[in-house]
Amino acid sequence: MHDEVSVERLNEHTWVMTEGTGRGVRHCYLLEGKEQAAVIDTGLGDMDVVGLAASLTDRRLLAVNTHGHLDHIGRNHDFERVYMHPADEAVFQEHSSYEMRRAYLTGRFRSKGFSQEQIASEEIQDYIERLSRLPRRENRLALRDGQQIDLGGRKLNTIHTPGHT
Protein backbone atom coordinates (compact mmCIF):
# COMPACT_ATOMS: atom_id res chain seq x y z
CA MET A 1 0.00 0.00 0.00
CA HIS A 2 1.28 3.44 -0.98
CA ASP A 3 -0.28 6.87 -1.21
CA GLU A 4 -0.87 8.29 -4.66
CA VAL A 5 1.94 10.59 -5.85
CA SER A 6 1.70 13.31 -8.48
CA VAL A 7 3.98 16.08 -9.79
CA GLU A 8 2.97 19.39 -11.30
CA ARG A 9 5.44 21.81 -12.86
CA LEU A 10 4.55 25.34 -11.78
CA ASN A 11 7.26 27.07 -13.83
CA GLU A 12 10.67 26.29 -15.33
CA HIS A 13 12.33 25.82 -11.92
CA THR A 14 9.45 25.04 -9.53
CA TRP A 15 7.41 21.87 -8.96
CA VAL A 16 4.80 20.71 -6.48
CA MET A 17 5.10 17.04 -5.50
CA THR A 18 1.85 15.79 -3.97
CA GLU A 19 1.46 12.80 -1.67
CA GLY A 20 -2.04 11.41 -1.07
CA THR A 21 -5.44 12.62 -2.21
CA GLY A 22 -8.45 14.32 -0.70
CA ARG A 23 -8.43 15.60 2.86
CA GLY A 24 -5.08 14.02 3.74
CA VAL A 25 -3.06 15.44 0.84
CA ARG A 26 0.48 16.71 1.52
CA HIS A 27 2.38 19.07 -0.79
CA CYS A 28 6.16 19.28 -1.04
CA TYR A 29 7.70 21.94 -3.25
CA LEU A 30 10.91 21.73 -5.25
CA LEU A 31 12.61 25.07 -5.90
CA GLU A 32 15.61 24.87 -8.24
CA GLY A 33 18.52 27.28 -8.41
CA LYS A 34 21.65 27.11 -10.57
CA GLU A 35 23.70 25.35 -7.87
CA GLN A 36 21.27 23.55 -5.58
CA ALA A 37 17.59 22.85 -5.10
CA ALA A 38 15.41 23.07 -2.01
CA VAL A 39 12.59 20.70 -1.10
CA ILE A 40 10.08 22.57 1.04
CA ASP A 41 8.64 20.00 3.46
CA THR A 42 9.30 16.28 3.10
CA GLY A 43 5.78 14.89 3.48
CA LEU A 44 4.38 12.14 5.65
CA GLY A 45 7.02 9.65 4.57
CA ASP A 46 5.41 7.42 1.96
CA MET A 47 6.67 9.39 -1.05
CA ASP A 48 10.35 9.03 -2.02
CA VAL A 49 10.90 12.79 -2.05
CA VAL A 50 14.64 12.59 -2.80
CA GLY A 51 14.16 10.12 -5.65
CA LEU A 52 11.33 12.16 -7.12
CA ALA A 53 13.25 15.45 -6.79
CA ALA A 54 16.36 13.85 -8.34
CA SER A 55 14.25 12.84 -11.33
CA LEU A 56 13.35 16.52 -11.83
CA THR A 57 16.71 18.20 -11.15
CA ASP A 58 20.40 17.31 -11.08
CA ARG A 59 21.16 19.98 -8.43
CA ARG A 60 22.36 19.12 -4.93
CA LEU A 61 19.33 18.86 -2.63
CA LEU A 62 18.58 20.38 0.75
CA ALA A 63 15.29 20.44 2.66
CA VAL A 64 13.41 23.14 4.53
CA ASN A 65 10.65 22.31 7.01
CA THR A 66 7.95 24.95 7.35
CA HIS A 67 7.25 23.42 10.77
CA GLY A 68 7.76 20.22 12.75
CA HIS A 69 4.48 18.36 12.21
CA LEU A 70 4.82 14.74 11.11
CA ASP A 71 3.24 15.31 7.70
CA HIS A 72 6.00 17.82 6.92
CA ILE A 73 9.07 15.94 8.24
CA GLY A 74 8.50 12.35 7.12
CA ARG A 75 11.49 11.99 4.79
CA ASN A 76 13.93 14.33 6.55
CA HIS A 77 16.24 11.37 7.15
CA ASP A 78 16.95 11.16 3.40
CA PHE A 79 18.63 14.59 3.32
CA GLU A 80 22.11 15.68 4.38
CA ARG A 81 20.81 19.11 5.42
CA VAL A 82 17.37 20.07 6.71
CA TYR A 83 16.63 23.63 7.78
CA MET A 84 13.99 24.21 10.45
CA HIS A 85 13.30 26.97 12.95
CA PRO A 86 14.60 25.99 16.42
CA ALA A 87 11.22 26.85 17.99
CA ASP A 88 9.84 23.73 16.28
CA GLU A 89 12.39 21.32 17.76
CA ALA A 90 10.10 20.06 20.55
CA VAL A 91 7.25 19.53 18.05
CA PHE A 92 9.67 17.75 15.71
CA GLN A 93 10.81 15.41 18.49
CA GLU A 94 7.23 14.58 19.47
CA HIS A 95 6.00 14.13 15.89
CA SER A 96 8.91 11.92 14.86
CA SER A 97 8.23 9.48 17.69
CA TYR A 98 6.90 6.02 16.91
CA GLU A 99 3.91 6.44 19.25
CA MET A 100 2.76 9.75 17.76
CA ARG A 101 3.16 8.57 14.16
CA ARG A 102 1.29 5.32 14.84
CA ALA A 103 -1.61 7.09 16.58
CA TYR A 104 -1.84 9.70 13.79
CA LEU A 105 -1.79 7.13 10.98
CA THR A 106 -4.38 4.90 12.67
CA GLY A 107 -6.60 7.94 13.23
CA ARG A 108 -6.19 8.94 9.60
CA PHE A 109 -7.72 5.64 8.48
CA ARG A 110 -10.57 6.02 11.01
CA SER A 111 -11.32 9.54 9.74
CA LYS A 112 -11.54 8.19 6.19
CA GLY A 113 -14.28 5.78 7.27
CA PHE A 114 -12.26 2.56 7.55
CA SER A 115 -13.70 0.02 9.99
CA GLN A 116 -11.64 -1.39 12.85
CA GLU A 117 -11.52 -4.70 10.94
CA GLN A 118 -10.15 -2.98 7.83
CA ILE A 119 -7.56 -1.07 9.86
CA ALA A 120 -6.46 -4.37 11.44
CA SER A 121 -5.80 -5.90 8.00
CA GLU A 122 -2.23 -6.92 7.25
CA GLU A 123 -1.91 -4.44 4.38
CA ILE A 124 -2.94 -1.41 6.43
CA GLN A 125 -0.99 -2.51 9.51
CA ASP A 126 2.15 -2.96 7.37
CA TYR A 127 1.66 0.56 5.96
CA ILE A 128 1.16 2.08 9.43
CA GLU A 129 4.14 0.20 10.85
CA ARG A 130 6.44 1.19 7.96
CA LEU A 131 5.60 4.89 8.27
CA SER A 132 5.70 4.79 12.08
CA ARG A 133 9.26 3.46 12.10
CA LEU A 134 10.88 6.06 9.84
CA PRO A 135 14.37 6.81 11.14
CA ARG A 136 15.19 10.08 12.85
CA ARG A 137 18.47 11.69 11.82
CA GLU A 138 20.28 14.59 13.45
CA ASN A 139 20.67 16.61 10.26
CA ARG A 140 18.70 19.74 11.19
CA LEU A 141 20.20 23.19 10.87
CA ALA A 142 18.73 26.27 12.51
CA LEU A 143 16.66 28.46 10.23
CA ARG A 144 16.20 31.97 11.61
CA ASP A 145 13.91 34.84 10.75
CA GLY A 146 15.47 36.89 7.95
CA GLN A 147 17.93 34.16 7.00
CA GLN A 148 18.55 33.72 3.30
CA ILE A 149 19.31 30.44 1.52
CA ASP A 150 21.09 30.99 -1.80
CA LEU A 151 20.34 28.24 -4.32
CA GLY A 152 22.47 29.97 -6.96
CA GLY A 153 20.60 32.72 -8.77
CA ARG A 154 17.56 32.09 -6.62
CA LYS A 155 17.39 33.18 -3.00
CA LEU A 156 14.91 31.98 -0.42
CA ASN A 157 14.09 34.53 2.26
CA THR A 158 12.88 33.28 5.63
CA ILE A 159 9.97 34.93 7.41
CA HIS A 160 9.22 33.40 10.80
CA THR A 161 5.44 33.18 11.21
CA PRO A 162 4.72 31.35 14.47
CA GLY A 163 1.28 30.11 15.33
CA HIS A 164 0.54 26.74 13.69
CA THR A 165 2.87 24.74 15.95
Image (cartoon, rainbow, N blue to C red):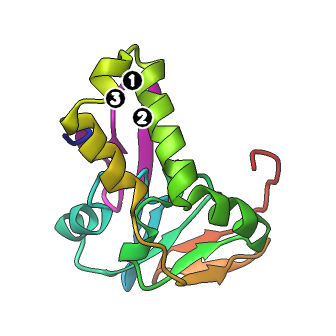
Does the rendering let one see residue 143?
A: yes
Residue 140 in the figure: left or right of residue 77: right
Q: Is residue 157 above or below residue 6?
A: below
Magenta residues?
4-29
| Residue underneath mark 2 | 25
Q: Are marks 1 and 2 in contact (CB under 8 Å)?
A: yes
Residue 25 in the figure: left or right of residue 140: left
Q: Main secondary structure of the magenta part?
A: strand
Are there few (<14), some (14-19), or many (20+) residues within 10 Å of tag 2?
some
Q: Are marks 1 and 3 in contact (CB under 8 Å)?
A: yes
Q: CA distance from mark 1 to mark 3?
A: 4 Å
Are there few (<14), some (14-19), or many (20+) residues within 10 Å of tag 1?
few
Q: At 52% from the left edge and 84% from the top edge, which residue is drawn?
A: 139
For the residue pair 101 and 85, the one nearer the viewer reads as 101
| Residue underneath mark 3 | 21
Amino acid type assigned to the residue bearing label 1 in the image: Gly
Amino acid type assigned to the residue bearing label 3 in the image: Thr
Does the rendering let one see residue 16?
A: no
Q: CA distance from mark 2 to mark 3?
A: 5 Å
For the residue pair 26 and 101, the one nearer the viewer reads as 101
Q: At 76% from the left edge and 76% from the top edge, which residue is drawn?
A: 144
| Residue underneath mark 1 | 22
Q: At 48% from the left edge and 71% from the top edge, which residue is drawn?
A: 63
Quadrant in the rendering for residue 161? bottom right
Q: Is residue 163 above or below residue 135?
A: above
